[in-house]
Image (cartoon, grey):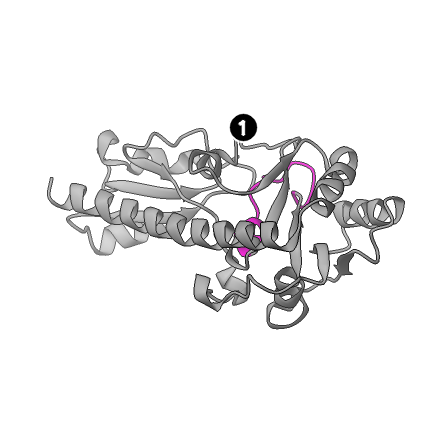
Amino acid sequence: MWLNDILISHTPKTLFLVILGDGDCSNNQWIIPYLSSNGGSIDAVFIVRDKLITDESEIFQWPLGVATHRDFPLFFPDEIDILSQRPFVCNFFGTANTKGAAILRLFKELNLESLCYLKMSNTTEFYGDYIQAVSDSDLTLCPASELGSSAESYCIYEAFSLGSVPVVEEDVVDNCGGDPLRLLKQHNAPFILVESLDDDLGDVIANESRLNLQEKIARRATVVNWYANFRHHMASQFTRVLKAHINH
């Protein structure tokens, strides 16, 4: 265990961890014996993808964020074009898995091929088609990648950063339990929640068609500014927790 190796070689006075929890939350309990409340060395943990053990005292939920491991860049609100007409109503940029095949079928059933951008790929080219597709779309479809996957995906945060509204499915089987979108809902994230894309995407597209450009511009401004404020809030919370434990 990497943590044991660190603690054997050096026991810090104060210790914090930021960790990406197990994708299906089946193996996140290992951290509990290491917490200071249980006699361990860890003062606080910020964990992504776990709703069962977070207590907002020692264990804090942390947002998944954008895919920095795939070099998705950091965008600031003033870098985003929110004024121009966007050529696509929506986009889906995914891999040819079960969910991707379902989206492809849905696009055909709803005759969305001319309205929305769809690309199936086994790799994500962030500096090419992906960023351009999201930037060119008013909506970004962000379903869970597979059955049992968390509804929280990189796609949500990447859409926010580019001023595109994420359309997110709530009706998914999430092995983590609880509400994987709790943190975003708590901060009033400007996304569109649907129970199922299969059942609700047609209505979402119809509602979108009723908006004029000025309404879309106002919404884009809301989206990019919300995301900037959300990032600032999470950074402030992180700093506040660190200071509280260091000064304890």
The residue indicated by pointer 1 is 177
Please tell me which residue is depicted at 68% across the width and 64% down the height of the picture.
123
Please tell me whether residue 187 is drawn above or below residue 124 in the rendered image. above
Q: Quadrant of residue 148?
A: top right
| Residue 80, position as x, y percentages in the image | 51, 65
Asked if residue 76 is among those painted magenta in the image, a careful observer would answer: no
Determine whether, in the image, residue 139 is placed left or right of residue 11.
right
Determine whether, in the image, residue 182 is placed left or right of residue 237.
right
Q: Nearer the viewer, residue 23 or 10?
A: 23
| Residue 109, position as x, y percentages in the image | 88, 44
Please tell me which residue is depicted at 29% across the width and 44% down the height of the picture.
237
Determine whether, in the image, residue 115 is placed left or right of residue 37.
right
Residue extending farthest left: 247
The magenta stretch is 144-158
Q: Residues within 10 Å of mark 1 (few under 14, many from 20)?
A: some
Element under label 1?
loop
Q: Nearer the viewer, residue 198 or 110?
A: 110
| Kind of residue at disc 1 | Gly
| Residue 128, position as x, y percentages in the image | 64, 72
